[in-house]
Image (cartoon, rainbow, N blue to C red):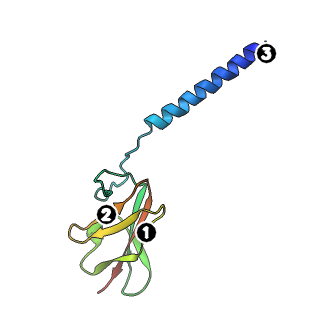
Amino acid sequence: MIKRKINLIVVGIILLVLVIIALIYFYPQNEMGLENFDQANNNSGDFVSTNTITMFRETGVNTGNYEEIWDNSLLTEDYVYNSELSNCANGSRVNWDTTKNKVLIEAIRPDNCYVYFDKIK
């Protein structure tokens, strides 16, 4: 009876380890998380999944108050990228491509990034 319980425990542990290995192996590494923005690329050109990119624009000139925006088309020539406030939670680097009007991220792992724009006019 004791031997049977030990065998069941060993088989259970082996199955648990196999399930964990299968989850790690088959977990999707490159999920799309940028529904409203262009894809972000790292230096090698491979897509790196990000959890979120949140964009904010200043509500008035030098107010320091920002509102969240959902579409980069809301950024007119009255706004300029704020590199000091823009950042990512897990250490990735975020930047704004002014020629293509899109977010650029250098990331090696999923991250949450925040992009700020100041009103200049």
Q: Which mark is residue 87?
A: 1
The residue sitting at 36% across, 77% down in the picture is: 82
- CA gap, disc 3 and disc 1: 58 Å
Residue at figure coordinates x 31%, y 63% from the top left: 104
How far is the residue under mark 2 from the one under mark 1? 12 Å
Residue depicted at 64% across the width and 24% down the height: 12
Image location of residue 100, percent across then percent down = 21, 66
- When the figure is inspected, residue 9 is found, relative to residue 110, above or below; the finding is above
The residue singled out by tag 2 in the image is 104
Label 3 CA crowd tier, 10 Å (few <14, some 14–19, many 20+): few
Provide the residue designation for mark 3: 2
| Residue 109 image position (x, y, % from top left) | 43, 53
Please tell me in which quadrant of the rendered image residue 78 appears.
bottom left
> Neighbour class for label 2 at 10 Å: few (<14), some, many (≥20)?
some
Residue placed most toward the observer, 32 or 35: 32
Q: Secondary structure at mark 2?
A: strand
Which of marks 2 and 3 precedes in the sequence?
3
Position in image of residue 77 (x %, y %): 24, 79
Kind of residue indicated by mark 3: Ile
* Residue at left offset 41%, top offset 54%: 108
